[in-house]
Amino acid sequence: MTEPDAGRSALSDGEWHRLHPLTPLLRGGLFLVVVLGFVVANLRDRLIEIFAPWLAPGFSGPVPGDPVDYVLGHDLVLLALGVVLLVVVALILIFWMSWRFHTFRITGDDVEVRSGVVFRTNRRAPLDRVQGVNLTRPLVARLLGLAKLEVVGAGLDANVRLEYLSTANAEQVRADILRLASGRTLGESRAGGAGPATSWRSAAVQTASQAMDSLVAGTDEPEVEPASVVRIPPGRVIGSMLLRDSTVVVLAIMIALVVWAVTGPGWLVFAILPTMIGFATYVGRGTVRALRYAIAPTDHGVRIVFGILTTVTEILPPGRVHAVRVHQPILWRPAGWWTITVNRLSGSRAGQEAAEAFTRVLPVGTREDAERVVALLLPWLDDAERALLFDRGLLGADDDPAFTTTPRRARILRPVSWRRDGFAVTDAALFLRRGRFWRSLVVVPLARLQSIALQQGPIDRALRVASARAHTVAGAVDTSLGAIDLEAARGMFEDVARRAVTAARSDRSHRWFVEDAATVRPSDRRDEEENG
Amino acid sequence: MTNPTPGAPEATPSPTSDEAVLDAGTFDELLESRREGLFVRDGSWHQLARAYRTVQLISLTAALVLVAVAAPIIAAVTGTGWVWIPAGVLAVVLAVTLILTPRQIRSFGYRLRENDLVLRRGILFQRVVAVPYGRMQLVDITHGPLDRAFGIAQLKLVTAAAASAVVIPGLTQDAAEKLRDVLIAVAESRRTGL
């Protein structure tokens, strides 16, 4: 792609622009197909009679009450054609009007979309609160070379959608939005592309820097994709889906039901069938999603791609991850697989199908894969903190002092996992480890922590323990830990409360390029502030 | 959108400047669990207004009376006996709440620290939560008719996490407004991203 003017595309110059002209066709396309299908279905016999009379020997003579006969019989053909024409013209006009009035603009501070002919809506999203940008290409749109762009905002139903743009334009607009959101003006983005681009990335990220550099030169080239740092072989995808706890349980129930159905009343099959289909769909969707999965660093955050028929490319800017969970179901343990889930602001309504998709950032991967993904999501973790993840955390020894675990006197509360359940606090993050058989470890970046709470009931009090809960934005990751020694819990409460304030104060990731500080650790920054 | 320079203490208003209005007409001793719980006993917590106990007792008693009056009427009108079961359960729950509420109210405390607000509550089930001022998205004050009659207001803080659930139920209206102004001023000077 040739860039005319310092990386700023014509679409993001602060003026109002229209979406792709084919938009109404795609948005209203389903409706038209339904109408067409309805007409064809109703006129099936008539059409066969007209175009292939030898196929309909039994069909002869007018049927009373048939509108087509009425029209033909009363010389109203012209009128009927006129009405049809009028309807078609009106539809086209409506579509055209709605397209004309559906405009967007991208200024230095926000993305704005206005639409509607009679009832006008206007939605504006501030760029420094952008939580991510998703590019979705459904199958039909992809055939036409179109894509829809979704700017994820912070809030319920706070997303701004631009559907549809041509793929090249969508990529360009996304790059512009991310550049603007990062705090760099579009003009300086070209000049500054090489310099700051390398500084906030961690060492693990640099493995893919070759692909990255080509991206910096032409982010808008849809064919140029950064090399994924994780590859998932198809066998592992299928194996991981089959070895999920839920899959095993459902399969067991189904086998029992089938046996019962075969030996018992036959109607049971009909009761089981919908469940089976539903479950197969669920497994199939997960598998398909994971089959074409890629995650890679870019200049403006982590880029995650998934989906075969409907391709979704999302970019998660730095500092938009509120909690990370590395988890291993018990059946994955022999294979050494892990999965990673995050808490983030998805900006969509609760219960939306895509919501689950955007929280699982690594469907399945080896320990190395998981470490690489965590390094992408939380690039500011230092070596000691990274060690807390696996070496001293999930795979650590029971008596490793890095984690403060449940005291022996309270082991009745956690009979199996009391040596494993524990926490560790660093300047930048809170680590919560849970489980002996279903192992998981949660990392909460303190710069994103909303508040921290301790709780204690009467049993806890008798055993001198308490439970803690780190409050983050709502999501699939549970950020609580029970049965902590009382003194340790109090210390952790004060510690986390203090460090969270420091970390949040020095956090600059909402405009991640203004001060090139996304990877500077809170402690370092505190020193800088005191010195300067 | 510009952010205030971090680490400039002379510009940040202190949350602990004027506390007299927060302590006017409140309880002056926190009720603790017999065995040492979550809290270290060190005093210096702000407490709820005494009038809030009156408000709670009035509304709970009113509910209890309502149940006691409504149950026989419904039983007489419908001529069935089953209505006594839910009515009885409700009455017991209300009576227990009525007994526990004054103690719970006296166990509630909050403290304005330099960088965060700390709340504690509960005797049997204790909870303490710390909310950094910079995380507050909005401050809500609500009061019903009975609250107004006794000069009581409820203050609610909202952060980006629903679980924070920071509600201070029974402040005097002066204290609530004072607290709101202080919190907003302090939050503004410590504003952070999400």
Image: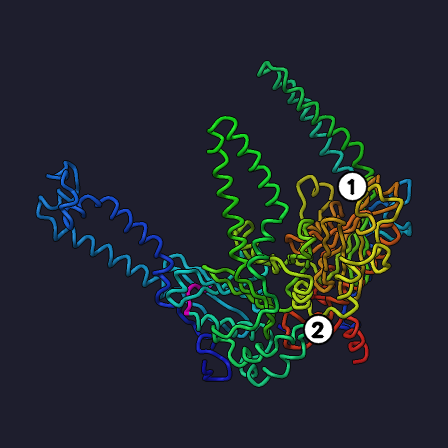
Task: Look at 74% across and 61% down and name the residue there.
Answer: B133
The 10 Å Cα crowd at callout 1, few under 14, some 14 to 19, many 20 or more, is: many
Left or right relative to A323: residue A237 = left
Label 2 marks a residue whose chain is A
In this view, A472 is above or below A520: above
Left or right relative to B140: residue A220 = left
Quadrant for the N terminus of chain B in the image: bottom right
Task: Tell me which segment is drawn in magenta.
Answer: A162-166
Whether the magenta-drawn stretch holds residue A14 is answered as no
For label 1, the SS is helix
In this view, A292 is above or below A216: above
Label 1 marks a residue whose chain is B
Would you say residue A152 is visible in this rendering?
yes
> Circle 2 sits on which residue?
A519
In this view, A185 is above or below A413: below
The 10 Å Cα crowd at callout 2, few under 14, some 14 to 19, many 20 or more, is: many
Foreground of the two, B159 or A337: A337
For label 2, the SS is loop
Give me the disc on residue B51: 1
Task: Look at 48% across and 65% down and name the residue there.
Answer: A149
The three-letter code of the residue at mark 1 reads Ala
